[in-house]
Amino acid sequence: MKIDYTEFYEQLKNTPLEPWIELLPKRIAHGLRYERHGLLPQWEEALAKLPKIVEATPSSLSPRTQRDEGVASTLVDLKNEVRVDGQPIDGLEELLKAFHPWRKGPYHIHGVDIDTEWRSDWKWDRVLPHLQPLKGRTILDVGCGNGYHCWRMAGEGARLVVGVDPSPMFVCQFFAMKNFIRNPRAWVLPLGIEDVPAAPGAFDTVFSMGVLYHRKDPLEHIEQLKSFLQPGGELVIETLVVDGPVGHALTPEGRYAKMRNVWSIPSVPTLERWLRDCGLDNIRTVDVTATSIEEQHSTEWMTFESLPDFLDPDDPSRTVEGHPAPKRAVMLAQ
């Protein structure tokens, strides 16, 4: 497996995203230059060592047969989880651990359970029931990480899912999964939102999950997201929030839960007002959930510090800096 977007460019032909075909190659190459991360050559080498999977029906989500050196009778499940069932592959766990740390998941690949830092499936279960049906939709997922939710969107029947994330590591993790899943409807590009070419009205649904609080100007971020939506399209914002009235937002000095670049964490009424100020309609908060150490924690696939290390050991309702512990809201708008 190698990082190759040829098939993606073919899918953009005769769509509102066709202008991207000329614009993206240079931007993608810039996002994957070796100066971005010293381990990128190592990850590319690990991708090249993954077993080659031959698939007869790459566009299908139904049971299918794959064959290569004893790999056969494989079932790909993207609707209820991200799972590729099949005969075990020698050395696969070691190869996949070369892409450490795995933050979003979990994944189940040929008997290897990738126990990621985040139970991203829990977040998806909170979000999915409230969405307009994703079948046949063109979707943009901003800050998608390794593409876990992109696969879940594809499992709901999306026509095309474009995930963007500036981390070369996450892009390599995505292509490691694509080696086995082989579904052409989900892609992750090595871009931040500021590098995504303009595409007014090109997307039916736009997701921004876990991004807003990292933006210096949250309203500008919302305006950027809105610009990609077609009229009547749906915006999905998932972000940290704090308790408080309209107008209140936490602007931490230094770090929040040991995270850098946390600029503003709004109250729910404040975020709703931001969305209204950006001209969005039908705004509704569909979930507010405190993040638990069961949902976010260190594992053998992500051995660095995680939520238990970010909380005050004497008062887990506060971060180590004394701020309110993480709570996340899901908000929809059109």
Image (spheres, helix red, strand yellow):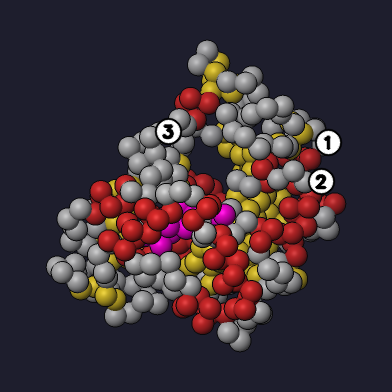
Per the image, the residue denoted by label 2 is 273
Q: x, y (%) of residue 12?
A: 57, 80
Farthest residue in the left direction?
A: 70
Residue type at numbered disc 1: Gly
Contact, CB < 8 Å: mark 2 with mark 1?
A: yes
Instruction: Assign the magenta stretch its main secondary structure.
Output: helix
Give the SS element for disc 3: loop
Residue under the point 42% across and 33% down? 304
Is 158 magenta? The answer is no
Name the foreground residue: 39 vs 75.
39
- Counting residues from the N terminus, which is met first, the one under dot 2 or under dot 3? 2
Q: Is residue 182 left or right of residue 49?
A: right
**How many badges with numbers are in the image?**
3
Report if residue 86 is visible in the image: yes
Circle 1 residue: 247
Q: Upstream in the sequence, badge 3 or badge 1?
A: 1
Say if 200 sits above or below 173 in the image: below
Which of the 4 image quarters holds residue 52?
A: bottom left
Residue under the point 65% across and 23% down: 323
Stretch of the chain drawn in magenta: 165-176
Residue 318 vs residue 272: left or right? left
Q: Alpha-carbon distance for marks 2 and 3?
A: 36 Å
